[in-house]
Image (spheres, rainbow, N blue to C red):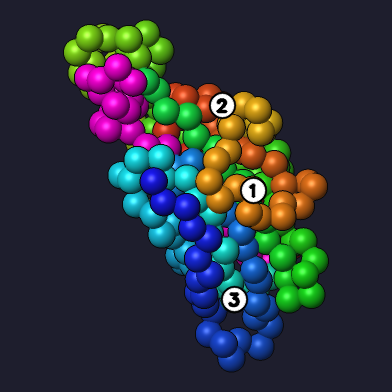
Amino acid sequence: MRTTIPTLIFLGLAAGSAHAETFSADVWADNWFEMRIDGEQVAEDSVSITTERSFNAESFTFAAERPFVIGLVAKDFKENDTGLEYIGTGRQQMGDGGVIVQITDETGDIVAVSDSDWQCHVIHTAPLDKSCESASDPVASAGACAFEIEDEPAGWDTAAFDATDWPAADVYTEQQVDPKDGYDRINWADDAELIWGPDLEQSNTVLCRLTVE
């Protein structure tokens, strides 16, 4: 297990861009995230998703020109497409996810937090039947362990993408997500909420987006 809050610096635009601002971001994810601004990666979780209990927070800066689109890829750990972890052990189970984000400008004012204003689309759901969790020999796509998966929609993290049919992010309480390791080291804004897809256990890969004006 690794707990860390590294300070990372990423530039989303050339430093000489006339209208670019520098923003600071804090992200905590169970288990892994990647953040993009207008389709360009500005940060990635420094702890591999294959690390057991890879809960950690990341703090970083990036440059962008408003308006811009935040694209967040969030993944919960799974051993394979069954969506399970600790397969074949006494701890075999569905994992559960959750992510929280806050972004401030150079003056320290909040410009974005994770909440129901975000739109989130699930591209990996598993298992489709939760009884898979207790299967003695779970096999992806077999019986209760069926799954649904799709590729990332082209350009989903840019302003040109039509996300009108994407649902609002689902919001969860701290009690539901039970955030660990790194979460308590960030002073979260009162309005920042834990978000995910419609099911903390079955939604394994979630794409979330928000336009910052």
Question: Could you tell me how far apart the alpha carbons at marks 1 and 2 are, in whole angstroms?
Answer: 25 Å
Does the segment drawn in magenta span residue 88? Answer: yes
Q: Quadrant of residue 204?
A: top left
Residue underneath mark 1: 184
Q: Residues within 10 Å of mark 2 (few under 14, many from 20)?
A: some
In the figure, 45 relative to 54: above or below? below
The answer to whether residue 59 is seen in the rendering is: yes
Q: Residues within 10 Å of mark 1 (few under 14, many from 20)?
A: few
Does the segment drawn in magenta span residue 64? Answer: no
The answer to whether residue 166 is seen in the rendering is: no
The percent coordinates of residue 127 (x first, y second) are 36, 20
Between label 1 and label 3, give the one nearer the viewer: 1
Residue underneath mark 3: 63
Direction from residue 36 to residue 187 in the image, left or right: right
Question: Could you tell me how far apart the alpha carbons at marks 1 and 3 are, in whole angstroms?
Answer: 26 Å
In the figure, 150 relative to 24: above or below? above
Which circle's residue, 3 or 2, is located before the other in the chain?
A: 3
In the figure, 160 relative to 114: above or below? below
Q: Secondary structure at mark 3?
A: strand
- Residue depicted at 30% across the width and 44% down the height: 50
Which circle's residue, 1 or 3, is located before the other in the chain?
A: 3
Residue underneath mark 2: 198
In the figure, 145 relative to 36: above or below? above
Between label 1 and label 2, give the one nearer the viewer: 1
